[in-house]
Image (cartoon, rainbow, N blue to C red):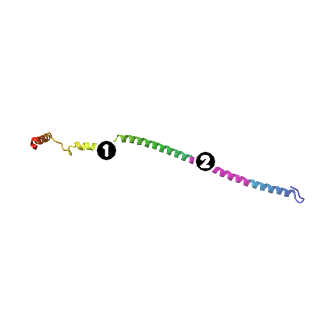
Amino acid sequence: MKLNAQETPNSILNEVSRRLNDNTRRIRVLEEKILNIDSRVNTIEQNVINATKQINTGKQETDNELKELLDRLANFEIDIQTMKKTMKKTVTHGELKEINNYIELINPITTKFITKKELLDIIENRVTDISKWTPQNND
């Protein structure tokens, strides 16, 4: 800074004071900008922390649900194996039909049984019929 003949110490002091005030104002503006940036960064950090917590909570819930589904699937597999074993022990349609036929065969309501007297009469009639067919009677 060169001193002119017209400059007085008061004018120099005023210039220094003006520059000092200008620099102080610039520093305050920069400090405010830094505070705003710091506040934004803190907000972003907090949002990231909250989002991370939510993601971790969601992941834990998903893991628990997956574990539960796997347990249910394992139980279904066990139930299916048990049902297969039970099915092997059950009667098939053909076997059931065969049992039904046997029951029908010996059912006294639908089957006609013969008495001893009726059987003896039938045998006697047949023997009589056969004796009629002797070679002597055919001529």
Q: With 23 as the anchor, is 66 left or right in this view?
A: left
The answer to whether marks 2 and 1 mark residues whose Cβ atoms lie closer than 8 Å is no
- State how many labels appear: 2
Residue 59's label in the rendered image is none
SS label for mark 2 = helix
Horizontal and vertical percent for residue 119? Answer: 14, 40
Look at discs 2 and 1 and give the one toward the viewer: 1
Is residue 66 in the magenta section?
A: no
Q: Quadrant of the N terminus?
A: bottom right
Comparing 125 with 107, the one in front is: 125
Majority SS type along the magenta span: helix
Horizontal and vertical percent for residue 112? Answer: 18, 44
How crowded is the residue under tag 1: few (<14 C-alpha within 10 Å), some, or many (20+)? few
Q: Label 1, on which residue? A: 94
- Which quadrant of the figure has residue 5? bottom right
Residue 49's label in the rendered image is 2
Comparing 114 with 22, the one in front is: 114
| Residue furthest out toward the right | 5
Q: Of the two numbered discs 2 and 1 on the same chain, state the one appearing first in sequence.
A: 2
Kind of residue indicated by mark 2: Ile
Residues drawn in magenta: 28-55
The residue lying at 70 percent from left, 52 percent from top is 34
Horizontal and vertical percent for residue 33? Answer: 70, 54
